[in-house]
Image (cartoon, rainbow, N blue to C red):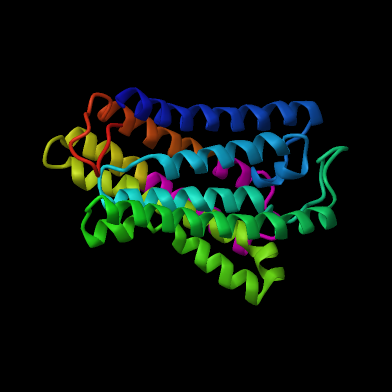
């Protein structure tokens, strides 16, 4: 069981490395850099981008947090990673190169994928809540197990009311909320580590603060700067790297932790 949890954690880091390698190699092939990580959906790196995000999302949902709050945050982040993968950002002019999918074809694909994701999220949340209830977990823990269904419900309502808005905006909104959830995990770890290790608490606080600052700057650039240039690409890459650092820190800290009961797992 310990080996399985270690593999889950290491898998997230390896997949983020795969994403970074695909972006770099595609940029070398094209001879230029696109203006954001999401823009590589419209390049030859599309499959690596979508595949790595889907796999990371699945691992975040599968991984059991050290407590109910962390578990809920990771579940929400995992489902939103799938939204980011399935709903691309708007195509932009530049050096995307030949072979990029057409915007019209992608719009039809997005509608199918969002509908499938909503159904999968609802089934996953319901199944996990039922299993938790049958296992005798308290009501708060049972509700946490259904947290993955919350963004699925929100997405379903939004998609039913305004599908065009979902296609146009869901990517950016999901990406921001995803990182907010991850930052929440890092900040929570900083507070949890304070009674036992000031060094670990300081490390988590530093990474969490850096992620929050970077995310704020990225959001501001998206909202205020009409010509983002490569600043957004650099900041998004930094944000993903900071997430990887936070994940590695927690992996190292909890490397030898055993399962205490049915609600927690080793990292």
Classify residue 46 as left or right of residue 233.
right
| Residue depicted at 42% across the width and 41% down the height | 62
Please provide percent x and percent y for residue 146: 38, 58
Please provide percent x and percent y for residue 187: 30, 48
Nearer-the-camera pick, 34 or 185:
185
Q: Can you name the residue that lies furthest to the right here? A: 98
Please tell me whether residue 19 is drawn above or below residue 162 in the rendered image: above
Residue 32 lies in quadrant = top right
Classify residue 107 as left or right of residue 217.
right
Please tell me whether residue 127 is drawn above or below residue 54 in the rendered image: below
Tell me if I can see residue 220 in this picture. no
Please provide percent x and percent y for residue 53: 58, 41
Residue 212 drawn in magenta: yes
Nearer-the-camera pick, 221 or 165:
165
- The tally of labels here is 0
Residue 264 lies in quadrant = top left
| Residue depicted at 34% across the width and 22% down the height | 3
| Residue depicted at 31% across the width and 49% down the height | 70
Residue 148 lies in quadrant = bottom left
Residue 199 drawn in magenta: no
Q: Decide whether the magenta segment is chiefly helix, strand or loop.
A: helix
Q: Can you name the residue that lies furthest to the front here? A: 134
Nearer-the-camera pick, 112 or 127:
127
| Residue depicted at 43% across the width and 27% down the height | 10
Residues shaded magenta: 209-236
Tell me if I can see residue 197 in this picture. yes
Please provide percent x and percent y for residue 263: 25, 44
Q: Can you name the residue that lies furthest to the left here? A: 195
């Amino acid at each position: 069981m310990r080996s399985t949890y270690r593999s889950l954690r290491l898998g997230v880091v390896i997949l983020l490395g795969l994403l970074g390698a695909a972006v770099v190699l595609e940029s070398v092939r094209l001879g230029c850099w696109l203006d954001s990580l999401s823009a590589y959906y419209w390049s030859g790196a599309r499959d690596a981008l979508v595949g790595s995000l889907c796999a990371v999302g699945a691992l975040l949902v599968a991984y059991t947090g050290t407590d109910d709050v962390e578990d809920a945050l990771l579940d929400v982040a995992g489902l939103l990673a799938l939204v980011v993968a399935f709903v691309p950002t708007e195509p932009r002019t530049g050096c995307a190169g030949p072979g990029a999918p057409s915007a019209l074809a992608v719009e039809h694909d997005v509608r199918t994928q969002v509908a499938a994701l909503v159904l999968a999220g609802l089934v996953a949340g319901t199944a996990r809540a039922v299993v938790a209830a049958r296992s005798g977990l308290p009501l708060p823990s049972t509700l946490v197990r259904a947290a993955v269904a919350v963004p699925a419900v929100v997405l379903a309502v939004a998609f039913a009311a305004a599908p065009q808005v979902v296609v146009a905006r869901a990517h950016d909104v999901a990406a921001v909320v995803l990182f907010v959830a991850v930052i929440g995990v890092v900040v929570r770890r900083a507070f949890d580590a304070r009674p036992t290790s000031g060094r670990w608490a300081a490390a988590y606080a530093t990474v969490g603060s850096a992620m929050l600052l970077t995310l704020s700057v990225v959001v501001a650039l998206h909202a205020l700067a009409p010509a983002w240039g490569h600043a957004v690409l650099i900041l998004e890459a930094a944000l993903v790297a900071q997430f990887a650092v936070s994940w590695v820190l927690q992996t190292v800290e909890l490397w030898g932790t055993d399962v205490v009961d049915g609600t927690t797992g080793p990292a």
